[in-house]
Image (spheres, helix red, strand yellow):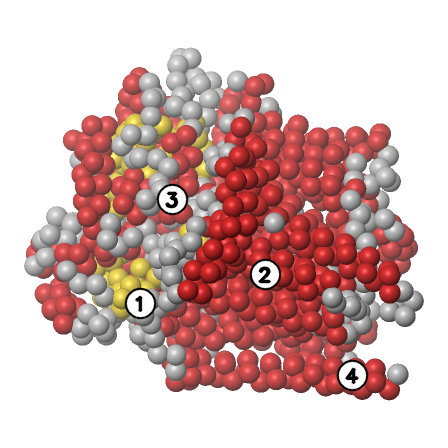
Amino acid sequence: MTSIRGLTGACAVVLASLCGFVAPTEAQTYPTRSVTMIVPFAAGGPTDVVARIVTSHMAQTLGQSIIIENVVGAGGTTATTRAARAANDGYTLITGHMGTHAASVPLYPKLAYHPEKDFEPIALLAGTPILILARKDFPPKDLKEFVAYVKANVEKVNAAHAGIGSVSHVSCELLHSILDIKPVGVPFNGTGPAMNALVGGQVDYMCDQIVNAVPQINAGTIKAYAIATPERNPSLPNVPTTAEAGLPTFQAQAWNAMFAPKGASPAILASLNAAAVKALDDETVKKRLLELGSVIPAPAERTPEALAALVKSEIAKWTPVLKPAS
Amino acid sequence: MADTMGHSATTTRNKSVVIAFCLLAVAPQIFELIWSIGTIFGWGAGRGPATVLISHATALLAGAPGALLRAVGGDTKQASSDVLLALIYSYPLFAVAILTVFMTIRSAQDYVGGIVLMALALFALWASSDLQGMRGFSFGAGTAPRMFGGLLVALGAGIALTGLLTDGPAMAHYSWRGPLFVMVSIVFFALAIRPLGVVVTAFVSFLIAAIGTHETRWIEAVIVGACLTLGCALLFPYVLGLPMPMFPRFLVQ
Amino acid sequence: MFDLFHNLGLGFGVVFQISWWSPWWLYGLSLPISINILMCLIGALVGTLVGVLPGIGTVATVAMLLPITFGLPPVGALIMLAGIYYGAQYGGSTTSILVNIPGEATSVVTAIDGHAMAKQGRAGPALAIAAIGSFFAGCVATVLIAVLGAPLTKLALAFGPAEYFSLMVLGLIFAVVLAKGSVLKAIAMIVFGLLLSMVGSDIETGASRMAFNIPELADGLGFATVAMGVFGFAEIIRNLDAGAEMNRDLVQQKITGLMPTRKDLIDSTPAILRGTVLGSILGILPGGGAVIASFAAYTLEKKIAKNPSRFGRGAIEGVAAPESANNAAAQTSFIPLLTLGIPPNAVMALMVGAMTIHGIVPGPQVMQKQPELVWGMIASMWIGNLMLIIINLPLVGIWVRLLRVPYRLMFPSIVIFCAIGIYSVNNAPVDVILAGVFGLVGYWLIKHDFEPAPLLLGMVLGPLMEENLRRALLISRGDWTVFLTRPLSAVLLAIAAFLLVLTVLPFLRAKRDEVFTESEN
């Protein structure tokens, strides 16, 4: 029976999205038509999933459908450039992340936009903790041993990452700059192949987002040394934080946040922020995000001002780490 | 084939091939010049036509020979990209064009095919000349493109050589009407899809493409075009859920 | 063994799960329906449609349909997405055969002999044998997933960068073998393809290569863009040449039977078997496995055929083998996803996305934790394949009738379909223009007797080859012997060398003969 309801639900969703433009709205204020949300990564990726979960609830609040447009390319900067140049009428938004709105500044010298100057912050949506992972037969047993081992064998170890500009690349660069080492980084085309190589023992270690790693850690095909957040994560209660394990300076999260092109009206931004905050308070949205291992921002972190401050501090954090690398 | 063709016929044919190669040798420069005309009207970014003309002309006439002399003299100063283009791409092709004058082409299809592939490879070599080479044991960004570029130069030369040594077909006949209108239709589609939407764009593109052949019967084409447009407008955005604009932007607003 | 039957029983149980549907307009009556069967059917239909439409790729469609699966039960959603994926493999051969436009990299080789058959008026048998081969391969591969899924996973893990590089070298040798004309020209086309694949950003340093500051080129040329150009648009332009009408009319008059003859079936049975085996094995390898499978199957048929010169001129084995191989590979590519939780290709990555949206995080334990999901999907694949053959065989008649549509109406329609398809991949108008430019390049290639298939293979395998070469050298710290000291890699290279010798020898001999005959004249 439940599945029937699911089917009718699906039909309703389809119909609603098809007929978005005829849905009645109470007041003829923003939004009067469907809103486009640009996601700078492929459908089904971590950023896309977060954006879809949050926007599906926001659409109910706003009374208009939000159409997700996945634009991939150049580490998300293609899409972000497009969003920066879009009309600032509030009908084109973007779900950016740590890469597109912070790490891109030092990584791409010819970047066609600036995260602070070309965007209006709306709200922080979710944070995804980053883990230090290694193949299951890598000798070190805990983070302290790992640090010692990697420092001692810097010529021998191989670090995998999912491509220049990816979360796994920039976070590992941060780790390396803290440890003051430059091991060989083996690039892969995305997280899947990198994880395959780690499970297959072709490479030694990598830093990656929690979503991809949890099932592998639970199955024992790879091991995790630490999680780079202040608190332990409920989906991996046995993995210590970097502070507990003795490397408190390594703090990194892949955050996702919503932005509008510069110059959007304050009223529109306020209503979007309110809708986003309301979505983050919703129990189903919360549950889904937590299932992904995400950290839901505290109420104080959800304001546009807090997001602006975060972008500023993240650019400051990544610039010294990534400048020499690129 | 060869015996039916008189000596004079071969020379005239060679002459047109030589001229074509010379044009090919400066094709990127001409392309940039045409492109740069757009900057007068403020379309796109880039150098203005006067700058393009002067810098390429000096590169071709003075810069490149100078750089060549310096290289022989052991001076390894980095040449500008225009000079490199002349050096890597244009000069070898001029050399080929000059050599062609003295050749008996036994298979124009192979000879011209090989030389054009060579030109593409030389162009790729120029385009990747600013990339980093080997860094210790690891490949740089430019290693593989240069490797394959060099290989393709050799293969192109090999194919051209077979065109000189063995008998084969002559140049095939090109028609202009089909390619032209199909291209115009495609370019129109690309330019119009965002501002005008699927309905208008698909229909107009259909009709432009239809000009490509003399077989087209107009009433029939308009009817089929309209049906096809309707089908596309239903199929792509609705059945497959691809997000694309339906109607012209100014009508929707 | 008992486990297997138990599991399959579970799977079929999930698929055939009956729900009672009582909509208000039936006034209290209830209808028994199976959601999962329905999802499977929808997936198969959409997949066929996507496969048939040139340009629209599986990746784009699955990505677009992902949000719709939000409201569905997870098993049904995944069954539908899987259906789209292998359904597209069935449909993809249709455009390859009818209009010489391969929609996916895996159907490039099908176009060679498939379209040649269509030109001889034998589009019907070609389409039918493609469907039959796909069905057989799909069934076998499904059983293989059920029986050997877990042990085969080890193969995917044993493949490191060195092995992948050697596999790609082997793949490029296949491309030489499949050429029907001059070997030199085929190699030149492969290298041209490799060079085209270098456009975009460098994986290791992120440097932009040969992109001329065009943002749309920053991530390289798309397969669909180049394939639509050198196959689709080029074919159209060529057919518009003066004098080509005669040939086209001839094709229309020649159309004969819709179904394969007894001889066709006898000829293609061993090809289907061999294609299935090759496809099943190579499909497990992440990245490029399915593409190499279809090329390998074709090469094998051509090499063991009594009269290899038939290939490229409408040999039915040249359709049967690669079509079986690519469908088998499409099925077995689920193995790494289901047993490891690691997606081997872009569509599988989207499936992971679909699972995470439904709160299922795929991983090595998904088989134990979600047996009804995994076995339900495996069972649905068999049912999906059955549906696809039932859908596709009657469609053959319709497709063949499509060939009778006058070309003056057909070609503008193909142009529009291709243009919309390419545009929809990235929503980028520049891609459409690039495809047009490659159409002109393809027209030029045809005029100079170069074959586009090796070019496309070079383009698909190029990045994989370069990346894995560089990865292998990074890991081995620049030691080239790694390709020979790792046993799997050495075996692959040995096969490649053997094949190359086998290909080049007759070519040299032919050249020598040619020289002799010339001197005699």
Give the mark nearest the N terminus, 3 or 1.
3
Residue B43 screen position, x and y as percent: 52, 30
Q: Which residue is mark 4?
A: C515
Residue A26: image x %, image y %?
41, 14
Q: Chain of mark 3?
A: A
What is the crowding at mark 4: few (fewer than 14 residues within 10 Å), some, or many (at least 20)?
few
Callout 3 crowding tier (Cα within 10 Å): few <14, some 14–19, many ≥20: many
- Mark 1 lies on residue: A198
Q: Is residue A211 left or right of residue C451?
A: left
* Marks 3 & 1 on one chain: yes
Q: Chain of mark 2?
A: B
Q: Amino acid at mark 2?
A: Pro
Say if mark 3 contacts mark 1, CB within 8 Å.
no
* SS of the residue under disc 2: helix
* Distance from the alpha carbon under mark 1 to that under mark 2: 48 Å
C500 relative position to A237: left or right: right
Q: Which mark is residue A76?
A: 3
| Separation of marks 4 and 2 at Cα, in angstroms | 31 Å
Check the image and report above or below for C477 versus C360. Answer: below
Q: Chain of mark 1?
A: A
